[in-house]
Amino acid sequence: MDIETLMWLFVISFIFHDFEEIIMVESWIKNNSSKIYKVLPKRLADQVMKQFTMTTAQFAVAVLIMFLFVASSTFIAVQFNNLYMFIIITLVFFLHSFMHIGQSIILRSITPGVVTSIVILIPYSIILYYELFSNQLINWKTIFICLPFTILIAPILLFAHWLGKKVI
């Protein structure tokens, strides 16, 4: 498979993963809020509920904003061979996959996004990074340069959730 196709598959992987979340999040939060309060400290549970208590439509708006970042970073990487934003965003989603697994372990239930994290995102990320390293498009220095910038994606995600709640 050529590397550009593999890079564009990131957009498809994102879509599958976030569709799982869009479909599940509203009903999952409603059905599991008591479990969240039993397992997590009250302040943390309050934050989780505040962040994720939204309608499916509101969450879809947040996903649309994130999709724009995913698609544009992929476009820039493929068209202009500028991989930094692409690596930052793929790292965010790779690490995000493990958050879903952790949530499922802590809450002892299937959580929105965990299935596609295990079946799609983690395997895809491993293949992507293997190919990027093998084709000498990135190295460990690239990863270490990009890794701290993954934290800067958090305000974008929070803004996307906020905007989703405000728009709809």
Image (cartoon, grey):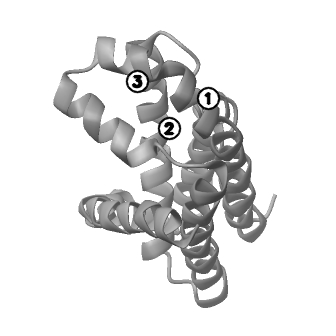
Instruction: For label 1, count other residues whose C-alpha is less than 10 Å away and answer few (under 14), some (14-19) or many (20+).
Output: some
> In percent of the image, x 58 and y 28: which residue is there?
28
* In this rendering, position of residue 10 left or right of residue 145: right
Q: Quadrant of the C terminus?
A: bottom right
Front in this rendered view, residue 58 or 114: 58
Q: Earlier in the sequence, mark 1 or mark 3?
A: 3
Residue 118: which disc?
A: 1
Instruction: For label 3, count other residues whose C-alpha is less than 10 Å away and answer few (under 14), some (14-19) or many (20+).
Output: some
> Is residue 39 shown above or below 72?
above
Is residue 142 at all visible to an observer of this figure?
no
Hey, what amino acid is under mark 1?
Ile
Residue wearing tag 2: 97
Question: Are discs 2 and 1 less than 8 Å apart at CB?
Answer: yes
> In percent of the image, x 45 and y 74: which residue is there?
85
Q: Quadrant of the N terminus?
A: bottom right
Give the CA distance from mark 3 to mark 2.
9 Å
Camera-near label (1 vs 3) is 3
Hey, what amino acid is under mark 3?
Gly
> Is residue 105 shown above or below 55?
above
Q: Earlier in the sequence, mark 2 or mark 1?
A: 2
* In this rendering, position of residue 157 left or right of residue 11: left
Is disc 3 placed on a helix, strand or loop?
helix
Question: x, y percentage for residue 41?
Answer: 19, 21
Is residue 16 at all visible to an observer of this figure?
yes
Q: Residue farthest to the bottom? A: 80
> In percent of the image, x 66 and y 59: which residue is there?
10
Instruction: For label 2, count other residues whose C-alpha is less than 10 Å away and answer few (under 14), some (14-19) or many (20+).
Output: many
Is disc 2 placed on a helix, strand or loop?
helix
Residue 102: which disc?
A: 3
Give the CA distance from mark 2 to mark 1.
7 Å
> Is residue 4 shown above or below 34?
below
